[in-house]
Image (cartoon, grey):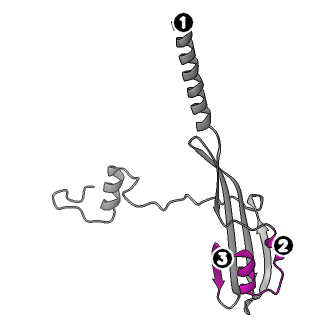
Amino acid sequence: MQISKMRFATSLFAAAGLAFFLTGCSPDVEHRGYMPKPGAFDQITTGMSKMEVEGIMGTPSTTASVQYKGDGYYYITQITTSKAFLTSETDRTVIAIRFNEQGKVKSYAQYGLQDGRVIDINTNATPVYGEDTSIISALLRTSKGARTAPMLQGKI
């Protein structure tokens, strides 16, 4: 009787540990930014006013103004998946609506991750004197064209 209780307790503890372990590894999906209404993008047409666009789409995530060329509204959605401590971007959607000078829709488009491109950040650095050089080269650089102390009598 005592052995069966011990086996039951061990089995229960192992099952609880396995369940705890598996729930920690289940993916967590997060939606960030603009949450589009179904069919809202399909209602946008060329020539609509900004007020009409905001009535259909809601407040934009961000706006852009180009002086004398009209404004732009951007609705940005990002979906990420986290599993344990690793996070990966699953989807990103950007709805761009551009307006003319009169505030009417000039063009509109929807972009996804497949439309993006990777930008190579320039990692070149301008060398700064004294940063990567040795003490000898720093001494030689300062002695070029400079007058030496009278004690050395110009022998450097």
Q: Which mark, by number, is residue 49?
A: none
Q: Which residue is mark 3?
A: 59
Q: Quadrant of residue 69?
A: bottom right
Is residue 55 inside the magenta stretch? yes
Residue 12 rendering spot, x and y as whole percentages: 57, 22
The percent position of residue 22, horizontal first and vertical second, equals 62, 33
Picture coordinates of residue 122 (x, y %)? 58, 60
Q: Amino acid at mark 1?
A: Met
From this viewpoint, which residue is outermost toward the front?
Answer: 1
* Relative height, residue 118 to residue 94 (above, below): above
Helix, strand or loop at label 2? It is: helix
Location of residue 73 by image quarter? bottom right
Left of 25 or right of it: where is 117? right
Q: Which structural element holds mark 1?
A: loop
How many other residues sit within 10 Å of disc 1, few (<14), some (14-19) or many (≥20)? few
Which residue is the site of mark 2?
42
**Total numbered labels placed on residues in the image:** 3
